[in-house]
Image (tube, rainbow, N blue to C red):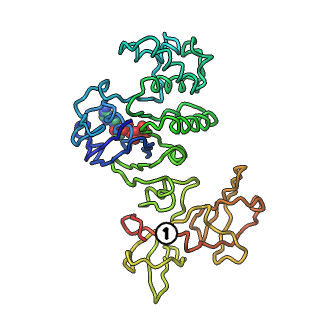
Amino acid sequence: MASIDIQDIRKSFGTFSVLHGVDLTIRDGEFIVLVGPSGCGKSTLLRMIAGLEDVTSGDIRIDGRRVNDLAPKDRDIAMVFQSYALYPHMSVADNMSYSLKLRRTAKEKIASAVGGAAAKLGLDPLLERRPRALSGGQRQRVAMGRAIVRQPKAFLFDEPLSNLDARLREQMRAEIKKLHGDLHATSIYVTHDQIEAMTLADRIVAMHAGVVQQVGTPLDLYDRPANLFVAGFIGSPGMNFFEGCYLVSGDQAELRLANGVTLPVPQRAGIEPGATATLGIRPEHVVLDAHGALEAKVDLIEPTGFGIIMHVSIHDVPMKIFTLDRAMLDPGPAVRVDLPQERLHLFGTQGQRVE
Ligand code: ATP
């Protein structure tokens, strides 16, 4: 297994700049998830680590060795793609053993590596089949098996579950997590799915527009998002935001919204009185209480089975509430709510978190 060190990596395609200086140190055995919206540059970064894309500037080191100019095959890294990239004319067993045969590995070693991976992934009954005779989930498993048999220094995953239906995604997600628990292989996993990021990662790297926004454990990002982008990206349904003017009088602070509504907020030395600030609260942290301080008009009820997403508005400012209380399936025209101070996030004029 290996550590991977990324220093000030930049990437341009012609005059189009995609990554603007990424720094990241990945520890031996760590499971890192790169997450961000489409086009933020996460696949490009992964492909540079694999050697499939040139580095415009900066250094990539694997176990301390600079690999910028090393061919992909010499980096000892295995990549699992969304498209599986299996050889259609080969059986599952041949697909899995191909890379070892190329390296002239002894037959008995190949058999034991393929046997071991097949057992881990439940592929034993499928070893003689061709890829076209497999389901999407089975193909994805073969793609992982092919990566495992090589015993590479690190695994790179590029949206490996995107082509699967929701149920299978859930199942494969758990399998990948279990596999990592067994192998403790250094892994970098790219996805735009924040649930995959939250459930799989030791640490998440949240990216936006070619810039790393925050690196931390899933709960770091959930509980203390570094800026408005991360706050809005992590969590479903997404965090509610209210933008307004931050005002202080005595030891009380409040946010005055454009429609004149004022919301009490905690005092923050990092925000100038009079400056624009944004308050954030997650839908699951809004408290429904008959004696709550705010009246909210009920606009729409979305039952999810597990819970209920309520779309409400406070003087025309929309907000979402998530509740497990089934009485809220039929709440009437308005409810009263509280926004507990300890659950509020405050962001300054530039969108940065202010503690
Ligand atoms: P997605 O989730 O959609 O795959 P991503 O975050 O992985 O998105 P990248 O695939 O890394 O994004 O692409 C980042 C940007 O670089 C995009 O604007 C893309 O159009 C551009 N890009 C990627 N490859 C090339 C290329 N070979 N030539 C020119 N532009 C490219």
Q: Amino acid at mark 1?
A: Leu
Identify which residue is drawn at 66% across, 56% down: 309
Looking at the rendered image, the quarter that the N terminus falls into is top left
Identify which residue is drawn at 47% across, 62% down: 224
Q: Is residue 288 left or right of residue 22?
A: right
Looking at the rendered image, the quarter that the C terminus falls into is bottom left
Q: Dividing the picture into quarters, in which one does residue 225 lie?
A: bottom left
Q: Quick check: 261 above or below 90?
A: below
- In-front residue for pair 153/324: 153
* Disc 1 packing (10 Å; few <14; some 14–19; many ≥20): many
- In-front residue for pair 57/149: 149
> To which residue does mark 1 refer?
279
Q: Dividing the picture into quarters, in which one does residue 124 lie?
A: top right
Give residue 338's position: percent from left, percent from top. 63, 73
- SS at mark 1 in the image: strand
Q: Is residue 39 left or right of residue 143?
A: left
Q: Quick check: 215 above or below 314?
A: above
